Amino acid sequence: MSDQPVLKTVQLTKTYTDFWGRARVTALDHLDLEVRPGEVFGLLGPNGSGKTTTIKLLLGLIRPTRGDAFVFGQDPHDRKVKQRIGYLPEETYLYKFLTADETLTFFGRIFKLPSDVIRKRSDELIALVGLQHARRRRLGEYSKGMARRLGLAQALINDPDLVVLDEPTSGLDPIGSAEVKDLIVELKRRGKTVLLCSHLLADVESVCDRIAIMHQGVLRECGRVDDLLRDDQRLNIELDRPDEATIAAVKAAAGASLLGVAPPRERLEARFRRIIAAAQPTSGAKNPVEKR
Amino acid sequence: MRSRVLAIAGVTWTEAVRGRLWLVPVLAAAGLLLAGPRLQSVDDTGALKLAVVSVQVVIGFVVTLFAVLVGASQLRRDLDGRLGLTLFSKPLGPGRYLLGRWTGVLAIMGGATLIIALAGAVLLAWRFGGLPEVRATATAVRWDAVTAVGETLPDRDRRSSGMLSGAPGDGIRWHFSGLPTGRDLEVLVKVAVQGPDPLDPVRSCLAEITASPTAAGTPIVLALQPGSPYGGATRHRPAVPGKVLMAHRDAFHRDLTNDYCRLLLPAAAIGADGRAVLGLTRLESTTSMLVTHDAMQIGVDGGGFLANLLRGALVTLASAGLLTAWTLLLASLANLGVTLLGGLTLFFAGSALWTIQDTLDYERPSQVLTRLLVLCRDAMPNFDRFSISAELAAGHAVPWSVVGQAWLYYGTYSVIFLSLAWFALRRREL
């Protein structure tokens, strides 16, 4: 794998101006960032922190006020670069009068894919996002979650090397969210680079290799998730079915440095998935009726 | 490139079909079929003309409506609804996007035109028992004046009209070339006749029409066609064998079937090289004739009415393509309200350029205003440049050359507007 960064920004700055060209707001301020091949990179920050602006700059949808952005070492406006990118915007913006099949065919044609490839990938992706039962329904009849799933499918129609996902779990139920996270892990396994933009910290923490935290257009922190979250001042000790005597011994050994003793809690998401999976009549089947 | 343009054009078409836009031409066609039989005029000829013009007007209305509304609203929806984020993050440039939208709208307008044209053809065939005759005509490459004593005066000044008056026996010789050989053709002739008393309503002049393969050849006297609207006996004058009674027909008389005296041009009067010389000799001194260069024409096969109607629709489509490009430009810059207003403004202004000319001719505006009006007149597209409905109503064929000219003229504007729209969209931040 090449060492060349997939994404690189150098002092990237974006200032939005009014009609007369007067600066209104600086959405991004001197951002230096690098995303390496095969990495799942998380872009974190509250609303208005400059995440979407960064993505738009990297996709060539807007122009920087200062600084440079490179994707695969090229200008983001380059059509060859865009040919290798899959993008899921913050909200699902698709044609409501098309069906899922037609939507994927349309985007496949935009990528100039041969018809048989489009057909094959459409089948795979529709199965992947669980929309087989609704593939011939128009998007206008889709729930928000279904549209989001299709948005994800269109982002992958060109089998991209770089997948940019802006709030991919927005509008999805916990099962859908978990499936998206599984998909991101699968993409990483297949050597794809993923830029994940979210303010759902748990999502990012569970799938990202590295994260960048932004606030008010400025990069506040950047590094490996493990490194950033590691707390060298504390230690967790997990014991398998300890008896009272063992617990008392550990407490005694820890002395004043002991902060607490409690059974570990299962994560809510894992619990939820387990309950839903147990309630499914057949494994893997999707509920065709989704709440609008 | 083609695939991306066609993908956008396809989505434009699909949206129109699923948005039930096809109801517009279908309802327009139904309206035409319902209202057509009720169109009244002084006679059947007038009613036929009215019906032909109605078909063209309905096509023009629907196509203009689509040109202004469809492409621009779809483009605005893509930008305002942020679908542009998804679209332009793909390898799709603004140029291909605009070209796709433009092509899609053109295809929609083409479909609508076809529906209305077919309904129009059904109406005409049903109401008038058949489709109207359409003729293409050939005009002379040059003409000479011939004096009463037989002297030929070549038209060196390339005049467009000439007056025959005074002693009888003078006339005009028209030189034709490139005519089809080996078969009989039809001569169409009309002149403006001025009697001694300008108030005299009976204005006609006896004349002789001859033809020969060359100027030196023996002229053949042409005979009236049985279906000629005039030329033989009138209420006031009996027919004269071998002669034609030319009735007064001025520039407003353009109907090839009803306003022209029609004579048979035998194949023998046409040279093997497709040349022929046709002569008109004035035989009376009491009236004078104002003869124009195109007073004498030779009718050649103009094709079927439906084919001509569709060629005329192609001309209309060319102008609608311009309007589509203009509204796409406006939609790239401004909101839908401004776009619609701007689209309609250009259409109405471009359909009324003659008013600017009238102002320049008769109102004597200030120098600044004159310059401004001249600029508008010269720069603005003229939507009346090819008056197809009037031509078709007058039985004139719409040749492919006119279709080509229309696409060249309107297409140039379309290219300019689409280029500007491309520039605007390229600069636009999503």
Image: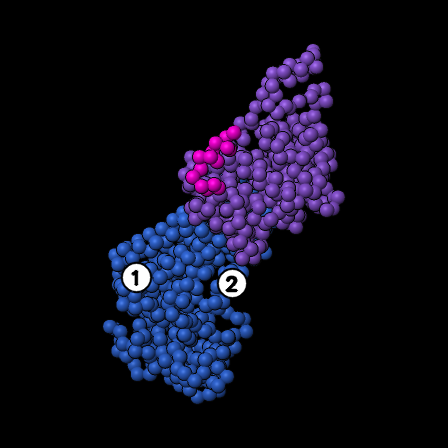
Chain appearing in blue on the rendered image: B
Q: Where residue B197 sits: x, y (%)?
A: 33, 67
In the picture, measured across the screen, residue A249 lies left or right of residue B69, that is right
Q: Amino acid at mark 1?
A: Leu
Residue at image position (68%, 37%) is: A64
Closer to us: B242 or B226: B226
Mark 1 falls on what kind of element?
Answer: helix
A275 is within the stretch colored magenta: yes
Closer to us: B309 or A232: A232
Q: Amino acid at mark 2?
A: Gln
The residue where tag 2 is placed is: B405
Residue at image position (70%, 38%) is: A35
In the picture, measured across the screen, residue A62 lies left or right of residue B34, that is right
Closer to us: A138 or B93: A138
Q: Which residues are drawn in magenta?
A: A271-285
Category of crowding for the residue at label 1, using alpha-carbon neighbours closer than 10 angstroms: few (below 14), some (14–19), many (at least 20): many
Image quadrant in which you'd find residue B135: bottom left
What type of secondary structure mainly makes up the magenta span?
helix
The residue where tag 1 is placed is: B123
The chain identifier of the residue carrying mark 2 reads: B
B316 is within the stretch colored magenta: no
